[in-house]
Amino acid sequence: MIKKKFHVFIIVIIILILAPLALNKYYNFLLEPNSSDAGDIIFIINPGQSVPQIAQNLEKSGLIKNAFAFKLLISQMGIGKNIQAGDFRISANLSSRDIAEELTHGAIDIWITLPEGIRIEEQAQKLQEKLQFSQNDIFQFDKNEFIKLAKEGYMFPDTYLIPKDATAEFVFNKLMDTFEQKVDINMLKKGSENNLTEHEIIILASIIEREGKSDQDRPIIAGVLMNRIKAGLPLQVDATVQYAKGYDASNNSWWPQISQIDYQAVKSNYNTYLYLGLPPGPISNPGLESIRAAVQPENTDYFYYLHDLDEKVHFAKTIEEHNQNIQKYR
């Protein structure tokens, strides 16, 4: 009986020793190259993708043997937060460890999001920040050159895959091409129904983008602005004064706070408190919803609006109602 128990004990000990060794051997096998083929595959990581999603996509692409083993490796290496969004040229003859390291610095192109409603100087800064990272030894983007080339209002806001060695001219052309692809010229021509040229539609849309906080508000704001233009009233839009003031170094912002003094003190054709009609050019780069709102303003009786502290918009038909809103919401 004692001898039998001893044999069982020995077997258990052997299993306890051999099992981890076998698991470790199998784990390392799963991390080996999935193929001897040296051909490259373009693998794309979208912004916001999680490590499990990336691992599953690598397995589906035939670049790794096992997604779970890859996730475990990423955890062991502690590099999950260092994985870049972009596209990568990867060979299936690389080990999982080599692929993991490649995903932290080897992107060919970088995902860069340029949001709606920012001006070209802000776009230039975002592009430089994203492209000028320490591992990018082929950085060529010139922020000042981009600002010179860029056309305010037409640098379409979107999420782009930008090459690491992109020049200012390349980025300018890409944004301009995207505008032409996504903004239907026939839609812009409908602005003639309100006596607006195609360029004036973009100017109006750029104001709406800064003033409207939701897709529901934008057509109404467009209607208010058109009502004021047709009535011969100044637009009196704070965003145009902010644009005219430019960069505020003290607050590190291109959209500084505006005081009532600024309404008269900022001497610029963009100041819609001083000059009637639309400003001479766009004040930001609008998205499609704002452009659509500029083309088809809502038919409304409102002539005034303001934003409360929570950015909710309150509309008014008369100056008396507007003053009441000021007292109530400011």
Image: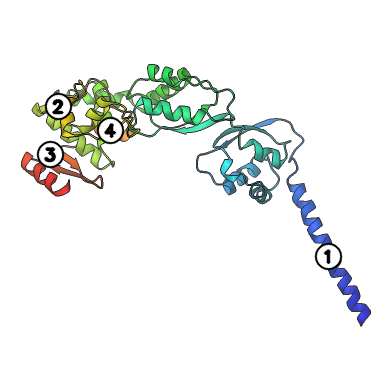
The reply to whether discs 3 and 2 touch (Cβ–Cβ < 8 Å) is no
The local crowd at label 1, few if under 14, some if 14 to 19, many if 20 or more residues have their Cα within 10 Å, is few
Q: CA distance from mark 1 to mark 4?
A: 70 Å
Mark nearer the N terminus (4 vs 3): 4
Q: Is residue 247 left or right of residue 274?
A: right
Image disc number at residue 256 = 4
Secondary structure of the residue carrying numbered label 3: loop
Q: Is residue 228 left or right of residue 213?
A: left
Image disc number at residue 15 = 1
Which one is in front in this view, the residue at disc 4 or the one at disc 3? 4
Res. 297 visible in picture = no
Outermost residue, front side: 250
Which one is in front in this view, the residue at disc 2 or the one at disc 1? 2
Kind of residue at disc 4: Pro
Q: CA distance from mark 4 to mark 3?
A: 27 Å
Q: Residue 289, relative to residue 59: is it above or below?
A: above
Q: Is residue 100 left or right of residue 285?
A: right
Kind of residue at disc 1: Ile
User: Residue 5: which quarter of the image?
Assistant: bottom right
